Image (spheres, grey):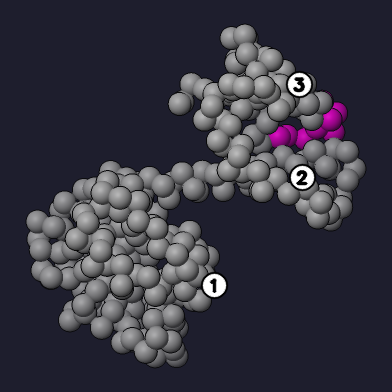
Amino acid sequence: MIAVLGTGLLGSGFARALRRADQTVHVWNRTAARARALEVDGAQAFDSAADAIRGVARVHLVLSDDAAVDAVLAAAAPAAGTRVFDHSTTSPGGAVERTRHWLARGVTYLHAPVFMGPQNALESTGLMLVSGDRVVVETAKPLLTPMTGKLVDLGTRVDAAAAFKLLGNMFLMALTAGFADMLALAKAMQISPTDLAKLFDHFNPGASVQARFKRMLEAGNGPPSWELAMARKDARLMQDETDRAELVLTFLPAFAARMDQVIAEGHGRADWTIVGKDFL
């Protein structure tokens, strides 16, 4: 038997996928109706987390944050020998402390955050991260691998999975902030969102992500592909267009300020990726 605690969009996808695999699934959610909705799929809903995990071999947590994970685990009080797999996005420190706390009580806690949407959870696709004690991770792999398209083992650091999940989410936030600024700039220049989207029929910056990051790790060494001073000039043009339209940009002003700082340090002729030099 398997328990899923937290049956929002992602948790309900996991529960349905486990049922499709003919697993006996117990479900619980703070909003009880969300758990009961899974009964049509053959899951058994419970009114308390403690009842939901009673007698199960493993527990999957899909919750909002550290506080929710700690509160639900405290209420559920898993018995010694229980495996707890936490797919929530939490702090690295929280993952370390929970691993230590529950190990002392005979409970195996493994943080396994995901890069998944609801459909990924349902279809067992997407990406799942794990890290920590080698025995714990190796014995978890046969249980977790069927739930994801790819299971990535990040090594012995207990908090590595939590850290890399935050890093990935930061990139997604930066990408979305960039899209927001593109929409603002397009509006300022009287280009419709539909026409803007056509740019990506021809321009595929995603293909250069790995190479661009590798270049950033070189701290601007080597011949520049785009001088920082020229990138700053383009940023100024973008800002001017949106200022004229009285629109507000999301990320560009802060990034332009960073470019100004690095140019003032004498790096205007270097590759523009030198803006990351202070963090290497």
Element carrying mark 1: helix
Q: Earlier in the sequence, mark 3 or mark 2?
A: 2
Question: In the drawing, does residue 59 fall left or right of residue 263?
Answer: left
Q: Earlier in the sequence, mark 1 or mark 2?
A: 1
Question: In the drawing, does residue 237 fall left or right of residue 42?
Answer: right
Q: Is residue 123 above or below residue 69?
A: below
**Image coords of residue 55 (percent x, y):** 17, 81
**Image coords of residue 257 (percent x, y):** 63, 21
Identity of the amino acid at label 3? Met
Q: Residue 183, which numbered label?
A: 2
Q: Quadrant of the N terminus?
A: bottom left
Mark 3 touches mark 2? (CB < 8 Å): no
Extent of the magenta region: 240-249
Between 35 and 278, the one lying in front of the other is: 278
Mark 3 touches mark 1? (CB < 8 Å): no
Give the distance between the C-alpha atoms of the residues marked 1 and 2, in whole angstroms. Answer: 27 Å
Q: Quadrant of the C terminus?
A: top left
Q: Residue 66, which numbered label?
A: none
Residue 273, picture quadrant: top right
Between 192 and 153, the one lying in front of the other is: 153
Mark 3 or 2, which is nearer the eye? 3
The residue located at (39%, 81%) in the rendering is 18
Inspect the magenta stretch and tell me whether residue 95 lies in it.
no
Give the distance between the C-alpha atoms of the residues marked 3 and 1, in whole angstroms. Answer: 42 Å
Mark 3, residue position: 230
**Image coords of residue 44 (percent x, y):** 33, 86
Mark 3 or 1, which is nearer the eye? 3
Mark 1, residue position: 119
Identity of the amino acid at label 1? Gln
Between 71 and 268, the one lying in front of the other is: 268
